[in-house]
Image (spheres, helix red, strand yellow):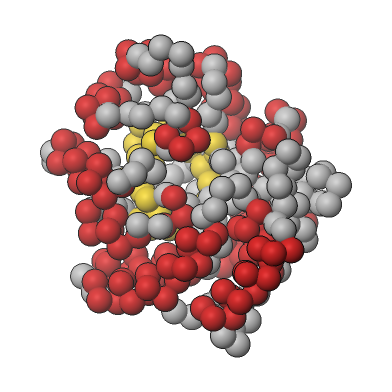
Amino acid sequence: MLNSFKGVIPILATPFHDDESLDFGSWERLLEFMNGLQVDGVTIIGVLGESNRLTDSERDQLITQAVKIVNGRMPIIVGASHSGTQAARTLAHRAAALGASAVMISPLREATPNDGRIVDMFRQIADGLRIPIVLQDHPASTEVHMSTALMLRLLREVPAIQCIKAEAVPTAPKLAELLAGMGGTSVPILTGLGALYAPFDLQAGSSGFNTGFAFPEVLIAMVTAAGIGDWDKVHQIYARFAALMVYEQQPGVAVRKEILRRRGLLGSACARHPGASISAFAKAQLDALIAHTLPGVDITKPIAI
């Protein structure tokens, strides 16, 4: 069971073979590597996990295998967003039944936006759900722009929402507004977007990171430094890795999956069609970027920061 949402909770890519079938050998390597880094949990079947390209049967297989492999050593959050409320409710309750520690859900775009329907959507999903909900605020993928007032209302009216994943830019000001609006009963807020705004979000009060940056060790080091108020170190780490964060955060999952392949975690960097895999030009740029950022470092092993 997930008792807190703090620290570093990486979003995992879904591994595919070159023929686009699920690669469970890579799935195990990826989960074991994250556990070895002592992350504070993992999130599976999110946007990075190509959730919209998976069948229901494949979702069940990925959740079941993750729960079996992890065997209680770290929490597993499962993406359960859907454009229909009943479908999202079914996905969330199915994830709970298969052993998930929490579910991550974002509202989906409607032709006529309505805050009341968003609140009702989360109420219906939470009804009878025995695990927490992470409210994902990611307008880049959902086209839903939730106001601070709406998010605070959701926290008040749907107690199952026990964490916010902040991905609406500019992230730091909204994060600060949310924390101020919560008063003394603060719900943890985790930073997403590949940690693009890491030091600013941490200074605004972020509890850590819930994102897919392929070097979670970097994020752990920043959270540790922020925890002792060493902001010089936070900014030093960020400055060293900022170019890699920016390059990796390009649209799609191609660059991130290629880095994970180079780290020895994925057997293939294949993205499911119509998603694009990495181009030869981007591979060459990535060669130079990794050589500049981590010269002589074996990235198949945990890197020292």
Quarter of the figure that contains the C terminus? bottom left
Residue at point 33% right, 29% down?
A: 146
Residue at point 27% right, 67% down?
A: 226
Q: Position of residue 188 (x, y in %)?
A: 30, 45
Res. 161 visible in picture: yes
Residue at point 30% right, 63% down?
A: 199
Q: Is residue 83 left or right of residue 67?
A: left
Q: Specify the quadrant of the image occupied by residue 229.
A: bottom left
Q: Position of residue 66 (x, y in %)?
A: 65, 47
Q: In the figure, 295 relative to 196: above or below?
A: below
Q: Position of residue 275 (x, y in %)?
A: 70, 42
Q: In the figure, 63 relative to 298: above or below?
A: above
Q: In the figure, 164 relative to 13: above or below?
A: above
Q: Is residue 210 left or right of residue 287?
A: left
From this viewpoint, which residue is outermost toward the front? 281
Q: Specify the quadrant of the image occupied by residue 265.
A: bottom right
Residue at point 69% right, 64% down?
A: 281
Q: Is residue 170 left or right of residue 67?
A: left
Q: Is residue 40 left or right of residue 253?
A: left
Q: Position of residue 74 (x, y in %)?
A: 52, 54
From this viewpoint, which residue is outermost toward the right? 19
The one of 76 and 291 positioned closer to us in this rendering? 291
Res. 24 visible in picture: no
